[in-house]
Amino acid sequence: MSVKYWVTWKDESDSKAARASALIWGLPDGQSPPQLSGHFEAGPFDTRAEAVRYESAIGTGAILPPPGTPIVGNIHLPSNPLAAVGDFFSKLGQGETWVRIAEGVAGGLILIVAVSHLISNTKTGQAIIKTGKKAAMAAAL
């Protein structure tokens, strides 16, 4: 039975504390470590040396994961909910956020137009379009 290695570490803002919280798990192939709340998980690694190399790179700014190593998941429960709210508002200032919002709105509009075109020749569709026009006029006022 072969053994695979996994690295888990606590989601810490201090890189030294994150690296100090890292654990290396040697488990039978096909098995992964337990899901720990507030921890990152990486692996599987073929050798313990690869897992140790990954562990020593945590918090150093090195590109993680090393080539060929998938990150399995990030289980994140914020320890301070107010910090999560602040993080949400800070992301509103990023251009990528607004690009994603615009893409979502455009996709929704395309979907609405397509569905309304498909149902426009039915009695139900005409009733829906009539109600939608009334709602749009009310919203415009």
Image (cartoon, rainbow, N blue to C red):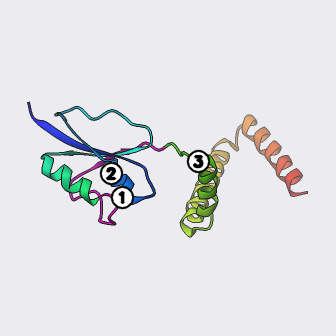
Please say if the residues under marks 1 and 3 sit with CB atoms less than 8 Å apart: no
Q: Residues within 10 Å of mark 2 (few under 14, many from 20)?
A: some
**Marker disc for residue 80:** 3
**Magenta residue check for 12:** no
Front disc: 2 or 3: 2
Q: Secondary structure at mark 1?
A: helix
Q: Earlier in the sequence, mark 2 or mark 3?
A: 2
Q: Secondary structure at mark 3?
A: loop
Left or right of 112 in this view: 103: left
| Amino acid found under the numbered disc labelled 1 | Lys
Q: Position of residue 105 (x, y in %)?
A: 63, 56
| Amino acid found under the numbered disc labelled 3 | Asn
Q: Quadrant of the rendered structure where residue 92 is?
A: bottom right
Q: Position of residue 122 (x, y in %)?
A: 71, 37
On the question of residue 21 being in view, the answer is yes
Residue stretch in magenta: 58-76
Q: CA distance from mark 1 to mark 3?
A: 20 Å
Residue at image coords 82%, 52%: 136
Residue at image coords 14%, 46%: 48
Q: Assign the C terminus to one quadrant of the image.
A: bottom right
Q: Quadrant of the rendered structure where residue 87 is?
A: bottom right
Residue annotated with mark 1? 16
Q: Residues within 10 Å of mark 3 (few under 14, many from 20)?
A: few
State the residue in front, 72 or 79.
79
Please say if the residues under marks 1 and 2 sit with CB atoms less than 8 Å apart: yes
Residue at image coords 32%, 54%: 19
Left or right of 71 in this view: 114: right
Q: CA distance from mark 1 to mark 2?
A: 6 Å
Residue annotated with mark 2? 20
Q: Earlier in the sequence, mark 1 or mark 3?
A: 1
Q: Assign the N terminus to one quadrant of the image.
A: top left
